[in-house]
Structure formats: structure tokens, C-alpha cells
Image (tube, rainbow, N blue to C red):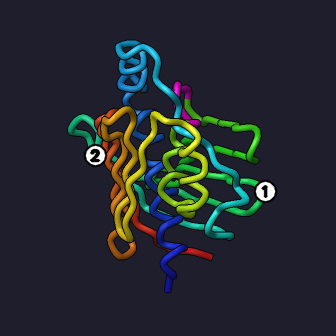
Amino acid sequence: MIDRNTGFVAVRTLSTLVVAICLLLSGCSSFNDRAADSGYQPELLLLSPQDSPFTGVLKQKVTLSFHDIERSFLVVTRLNSEKIVLVVLLPTGQQLFQLIYDGQKLQHKASVVADIPTRELLAIMQFSLWPKASVKQAYSMADEWKLGWSEKVRVLSLRQELWLSVVFESNQIHIDNLLENYQVKIETLEAQ
């Protein structure tokens, strides 16, 4: 059985990976177009691996819906207080990419050539999974961010515009990135 904290971590990790895969398949045009059209756009914040609510390995199924395309991936995440390692695999087992973050440096190792906004993907995962106190402390430093919180929902707004909505349902997490127009469903398969 997976406890509630483990489920949250699994869902967030999956959402991040799903987004990454979706961007990989789409050539990241949505991210690049929005940034060019809107001028200055602050980045989502990265949080310390030390604040991770779970230590261990998660295996998750991530389903990404983006521009009427739905794709599923397997995501394996290793979390500890020193670093986060995410590996995204196709259902066939082929690795798409690996993401490593030690709290200072973010590394992206792709098995295929693509311009993937790995920093944003990791930040979305952390917003979804990290404890409320850690997220609140980081995002309260900037006036342009607004947080909404309940037991089963987290929302993040930028300048009064809803950016992220995260909904927790049993062993699944549903993420809606309204500014980037994609949805992610994360289902935890195993937690060790």
C-alpha cells in the first residue's frame, strides 16, 4: 500500500514527466510561442531536494494530453535529500531522457534530440508534491505569485491568471497547466 505522502510524490513526479514527454513530442512549440508572445514571463521556482516528502523510488504511469494527442509513459523517480533523478521511458522500455537535480544544478540527458524545458517540468513536480510550508515559503517571496490550497487541490496563479491546477484523487494526480494548455494524469504503480 502507498501512504498519502507517497501518492502525492508519485503523482507530481508523473505529471512532470508527462509534461516533458508531451513537450518532447510536440517540439516544445507551445512553450516557445507563449514566451515570445507575452514578453517577460517569470519562471516557476525550484525547491530543495531536502524538502522532498518522500525518500525512495517511485514507478508511475503518466498520461499526457496535449493538443488532442494523448500519450502514456513510464516514469521512474529516485528521491532523496541530496538529489532527484527522473527517468522517462516509453511503454516499450526505451529511455527518452533523464533529469538530475541536486538543489543547485539541473542536468538533462536526452536519448533523443529535443528542446525540453526541464526546469519548468521539475518545478511543476515540486509544486505538486513538496510540503505546503516549502512551497509557500518559496512562492511568497514574489508578489506576482498567488497560491491556493486545500487537502485535495493546489492552484498557482500568476498576476491573477490561473497557471496550474493540481487535483489529488486516491492514487492519481491530475494536473492542468492552463497557460501551456496541457493536462497530465499520474498514477503510482509502485513505491519503494
Estimate how packed mark 1 is, as few (under 14), some (14 to 19) or many (20 or more) residues with alpha carbons within 10 Å: few
Say whether disc 2 or disc 1 marks the residue closer to the N-terminus.
2
Quadrant where the C terminus lies? bottom right
User: Which residue is depicted at the point 37% across and 66% down?
Assistant: 150
In the picture, measured across the screen, residue 49 lies left or right of residue 62, that is right
Q: Which residue is mark 2?
A: 70
The answer to whether 125 is drawn above or below residue 54 in the figure is above
Figure quadrant of residue 134: bottom right
Q: Residue furthest bottom?
A: 1
Return the x and y of residue 93 as percentages of the image width and height.
Answer: 52, 54
User: Which residue is depicted at the point 37% across and 45% down?
Assistant: 164
**In the image, what residue type sits under mark 1?**
Glu
User: Which residue is depicted at the point 67% across and 60% down?
Assistant: 51
Contact, mark 2 vs mark 1 (Cβ under 8 Å): no
Magenta span contains residue 123 = no
Residue 95: which numbered mark, if any?
none
Q: Which residue is mark 1?
A: 82
**Residue range highlighted in magenta:** 113-119
Q: Look at the image and tell me whether residue 63 can be seen.
A: no
